[in-house]
Image (cartoon, rainbow, N blue to C red):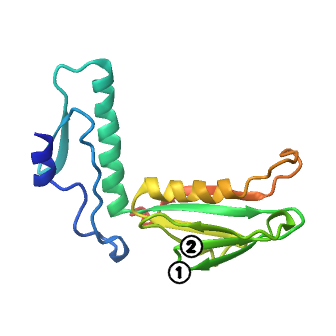
Amino acid sequence: CYKRCMRDSHFGFPFSPTPTFAGTLTKDLSHLQVDLFKTEVDGKPHVKVEVWHGTSKRIAGTRTVVSHVNNLFLGVTRGYRYTMRLVYAHFPINVTIEDAGKTIEIRNFLGEKRVRIVKMLDGVTIAKDKGVKDQLVLEGNDIENVSRSAAQIHSCCLVRAKDIRKFLDGVYVNGKGHIYNPEE
């Protein structure tokens, strides 16, 4: 039933309230033994997740499926934004963004000559924040790709062979949220 339900109801919307989020997101959940149905409750579309004769692990998998589907819907309708700050004490970290926001080059980290190059994952763009100095903004539809790109940037700028209580230099995640907020 899973394959048929996935063919009948794509996870994601073909349109969005903001033009930058056009497209669909798909996720393969075939490793979980659950049934997915597209239903309507009070005239609004819902996705129903069922498990039959569930053990504790299979029942826990239903919550995982609900979270993944919710993240897909929120990603297409609102998008995800992570902000990162460049933190340095003495040597200023220089950042260059190339390939239309698909690649970032980090130079002069702790005064090192080595250039760190990080490529963004699919659907993620990076830009410098114009309002705040030394701040980066990562945006995309898929929360997994946005968060993994932020983690790759953070992990490439870790201090090694020094006391991390003293040397706090690096690139840290400053905030998480949505690109489009209907409340604003």
CB-based contact (under 8 Å), mark 2 and mark 1: yes
**Residue tagged by mark 1?**
99
**Residue tagged by mark 2?**
103
Q: Height in image: 7 above or below 14?
A: above
Q: Secondary structure at mark 2?
A: strand
Q: Height in image: 15 above or below 98?
A: above
What residue lies at 16% left-to-right and 24% top-to-bottom? Answer: 52
Position of 22 with respect to 37 (left or right) is right
Residue 153, percent from left and from top? 63, 60
Q: Secondary structure at mark 1?
A: loop
Callout 1 environment at 10 Å: few (<14), some (14 to 19), or many (20+)?
Answer: few
Farthest residue toward the front?
114
Position of 136 with respect to 158 (left or right) is left
What residue lies at 34% left-to-right and 45% top-to-bottom? Answer: 68
Q: Which numbered tag is attached to residue 18?
A: none
Q: Judge whether residue 176 can be spotted in this image.
A: yes
Who is closer to the viewer here, 132 or 92? 92
Residue 57, percent from left and from top? 33, 23
Residue 50, percent from left and from top? 18, 32
Who is closer to the viewer here, 8 or 38? 8
What residue lies at 37% left-to-right and 75% top-to-bottom? Answer: 20
Q: Quadrant of the N terminus?
A: top left
